[in-house]
Image: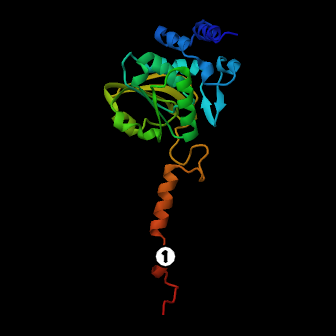
Amino acid sequence: MDPAALREDMVDGLIHESKGVLTDEAVAVAMRDVPRHEFLEDERVAYADRDSDRLGTRVLSPSSVARLLQALAVREGDSVLVVGAGVGYTVAVVAELAGERNVHAVDIARPVVYEARANLERAGYGGVLVDCRDGARGLPEYAPFDRILVEAAAIDPPRALLEQLSADGRLVFPRGSQRQRLEAVSADGSTERFAAVSFDPLLVDGEQSGSLERNRTAREDVEHARQRASARAGWEQEWIEWE
């Protein structure tokens, strides 16, 4: 079947009252334009409204993407940072809304970054910058951003990301652990809450798939460093007879 027709059906299904997920006309137009099949190998999977997996990362369903982008409220010309580039589909829709040269994306997993770059280039969005970074640290060299989208759950928005917002900027992320709700935080500290969602947690260095070492949280790394610093070694060991 023609991919353009599949896209039309996908977006119409999100708009239809049976789902009622997609109400923003600009987001609808952008999702009609982005060739989602360039980001997933199977066309039937690409245009079905369900999550899928690729290279150990979760590819969001079209309805989840619609919810995120409507909360983000991207305007043409906005400078946008997407934390969690994934395979690049959400990034491409943002590029349709803001202009590809205004969009930056980061992901903590290097194989995923390569995948996103290749997919975006093939789909016609090669002007988007995608870099391998710890998403919680953002992309300070390109800040400030008018919009920041975090495609992973956190208890609170990372401080570094809030500091990278412009004066009238807006950060959207899933807040919570077990129970999550989509939330928008403005630079002035005001918040807006949206529907309940379910996302994977925001990862830090060492937790990404394919890591050579055992995945550890930042908290564990600090604890191990403290243990090493307080441990006795060499001449400090009282039981060693040095003479």
- Comparing 28 with 198, the one in front is 28
The N terminus sits in image quarter: top right
In the figure, 95 relative to 12: above or below?
A: below
Image label count? 1
Would you name the residue on which mark 1 appears? 233
> Dot 1: within a 10 Å radius of its alpha carbon, few (fewer than 14), some, or many (20 or more) residues?
few
Colouring scheme applied when the structure was drawn: rainbow
Q: Nearer the viewer, residue 121 or 162?
A: 121
Q: Residue at horizontal 63%, vertical 37%?
A: 56
Q: Is residue 8 above or below residue 112?
A: above
Q: Secondary structure at mark 1?
A: loop
Q: Is residue 108 above or below residue 179?
A: below
The percent coordinates of residue 50 (x first, y second) are 66, 22
The spot of residue 230 in percent (x, y) is 45, 69
User: Given the current orientation, which residue lies at the most extreme bottom position?
Assistant: 243
Q: What residue is drawn where x is 48% and y is 79%?
A: 234
Question: Looking at numbered disc 1 in the image, what kind of residue is underneath it?
Answer: Ala
Question: Percent position (x, y) of residue 99?
Answer: 42, 19
Residue plotted at (47% across, 42% down) = 134
Outermost residue, left direction? Answer: 167
Residue 177 shows in the view: no
Residue 28 in percent (x, y) is at 52, 10
Residue 60 in view here: yes
Residue visible at 48% across and 71% down in the picture: 231
